[in-house]
Image: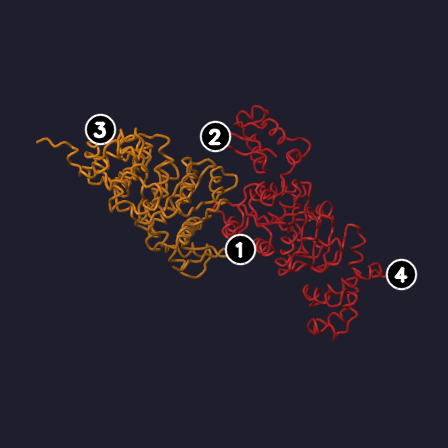
Chain colours: A orange, B red
Amino acid sequence: MFLHPTMALDADLAAWLKLSLAPGLTGAGLRRLLGEYGGPARVLEASRAALARHVTDAVAASIKETSADAALATVAAWLEDPSNHVVTLADGDYPPALLQTVDPPPLLYVKGRLELLARPAIAVVGSRNATPQGAANAEAFARTLSEAGLTIVSGLALGIDAAAHRGGLAGTASSVAVLGTGADIVYPARNRALAHELAARGAIVSEYPLGTRPLAPNFPRRNRLISGLALGCLVVEAAADSGSLITARLATEQGREVFAIPGSIHSPLARGCHALIKQGAKLVETAADILEELRLPPPPPSAAADTGGESPLRDVLAALGYDPCDLDTLATRCGKSIAETAALLTQLELDGYVTLLPGGLYQRLAR
Amino acid sequence: MFLHPTMALDADLAAWLKLSLAPGLTGAGLRRLLGEYGGPARVLEASRAALARHVTDAVAASIKETSADAALATVAAWLEDPSNHVVTLADGDYPPALLQTVDPPPLLYVKGRLELLARPAIAVVGSRNATPQGAANAEAFARTLSEAGLTIVSGLALGIDAAAHRGGLAGTASSVAVLGTGADIVYPARNRALAHELAARGAIVSEYPLGTRPLAPNFPRRNRLISGLALGCLVVEAAADSGSLITARLATEQGREVFAIPGSIHSPLARGCHALIKQGAKLVETAADILEELRLPPPPPSAAADTGGESPLRDVLAALGYDPCDLDTLATRCGKSIAETAALLTQLELDGYVTLLPGGLYQRLAR
């Protein structure tokens, strides 16, 4: 017997999907109707005239008349992959952080680890045209924050976003990409491998119907989910007109903390961060600054310092102990070159494990 | 007839000098005695027992018993140069800004343009081990601020201080150096030429007796005068343990605005500035940021853009006009290379004459 794919969908979910796909019906309009009727099936049962008391007549008509069969079949087929999920405002799995925002999407398409959306998270965003140092900063901050238990949320753009996702995936709390396209579309194409890794070990989220192509207006709207899913938003590099500043503004409006990494006054990619700091964002120099501001404990040293099989970072930490020590002595103790030791110390300092005291002495920070 | 040099000193000034030179008598102690007796001559006439009711017996003894003849002769000889001055708390020439501080020195030795000490001023300080970019920033900010009418106050140290003095001297409001040595001692020796220029076209100030050699404790104390003479304090580059942070703290305590230039999180010389911004200092990217915060008008464009006989900066401003324009077009209009035009635009941007709009367009700022 032939089973129509739509049949595979739970009736309630099918009703949610139909409403979410009705042209012209906004999230706010749908939430209003759900409030009036108590559930999506009841909304669909209402007459056009009844609906038109709560939305425009054109939208009421679109709810009653649009056939969503093809789209529902697409969703049903997509859901055959057990790593794909659709969650609605009524589901227990709906991200709790988004419920605290003023405009939560009625329905989310999620590819990957759904449970990550309920974890404490931080948004890490910035320029697509990042400098190499900016990308390295994004990755290092994200890795340390992920080790400290914060899932890294970003937008899968090139530059800072991609580096932030990589850092998040390298840590224990992984990473979530919020797309401005359908959850089944990878944009930009250059991030295909990263998107696959996020789907496998992190999560990809979109409020847009499957198959939605990159459309300019969707990206700024998407940004409210990046900030909304997170406790705070870190801007790593941003030009004066960067879209990251929109995300930061939305974060502020949502009551989230905004953090910005400063840079040279001659770097165009520091302008956006400096503007944010002037407006009250916290200037941060290390991931530890962010954890402190969010009142979260730092990551376990062994985990963060043990990246990969060998652990040069842990070697340096061990050689340092808890007494102040200069670079030359440390290099001798570790059996490494001065340059290599200095580079490792910089990483450890960035990660909040050591601090540089007056007189060029390094001090391990107690945890 | 032999005229003893002391004879050349006004009796009242001689009394001020004697008291200021009495070992153990602090500025606070002297101000207390002056408050009790009404003037320095009256203090000197008081008995040791009477004085000891207001200061310790040892200090009372030192006031009554110390012979200051040799020192007074030195001062009298120094004052034969008409560019040298001694001003006391009772003089109309005493810097008004210092009178608003809690610990104004009873007496100041001033070499050069005494009137500069009554002008609106800004302190510009930072690391002795400045980076070339840091020194260039200090000089550019100081020049623009000086053009805008703010006298540049600093400490004649190597690095940022020296660059700030040079920038101040290049502008119209000149520069003042506050020394931790006697006003007749140049320290460090490498700044000899700069000190001579400051004495000729700016001013050199010290509260320490002539001949006072560089003594470590005098420098931090001296910093309260650098900040006290100014409306605000700009820190350009400073390590985490920099003496400039003392000046910034004193500025805050004196109710002065603190400004700091940010930098890379990987630059040790940005640490101090970042720490200040975290504590509430204003992050500044241009001299215009400072002028705006102090509610002062920007410098006249023709003056600041006209440095030297020829005026490449003014050429670029003229070519730009008041409509947005891209770099290539501007370079063609000016008949300069792209690199040269870009460098001039950066200077103009730093000085607050132009701003970079989205899309790489430069916009001249209306004044």
Q: Tell which residue pokes out farthest to the left in this image.
A: A1
Are dots 2 and 1 on a single chain?
yes
Same chain? Circles 4 and 3: no
Cα distance in 3D space between marks 1 and 3: 69 Å
Secondary element type, mark 1: loop
Q: Which residue is label 2 attached to?
A: B359
Q: CA distance from mark 2 to mark 3?
A: 43 Å
**Between marks 4 and 3, how big is the CA–CA gap?**
117 Å
Q: Position of residue A66 (x, y in %)?
A: 24, 28
> Do pointers 1 and 3 mark residues of a single chain?
no
User: Closest to the observer: A245 or A209?
Assistant: A209
The mark that comes first in sequence, 4 or 2, is 4
Q: Of discs 1 and 3, which sits in the foreground?
A: 3
Residue at disc 4, secondary structure: loop
What label does residue A67 carry, if any?
Answer: 3
Real-space CA distance between mark 2 and mark 1, rounded to the nearest whole angstrom: 40 Å
Disc nearest the viewer among 2 and 1:
2
Quadrant location of the C terminus of chain A?
Answer: bottom left
The amino acid type, in three-letter code, at marker 1 is Asp
The mark found on residue B2 in the picture is: 4
Which amino acid lies under the numbered mark 2 shown in the image of this protein?
A: Gly
Q: Nearer the viewer, mark 4 or mark 2?
A: 2
Q: Are marks 2 and 3 on the same chain?
A: no
Amino acid carrying label 3: it is Ser
Specify the subunit that label 2 lies on: B
**Residue B101 image point, x, y percent:** 65, 57
Left or right relative to B217: residue A257: left
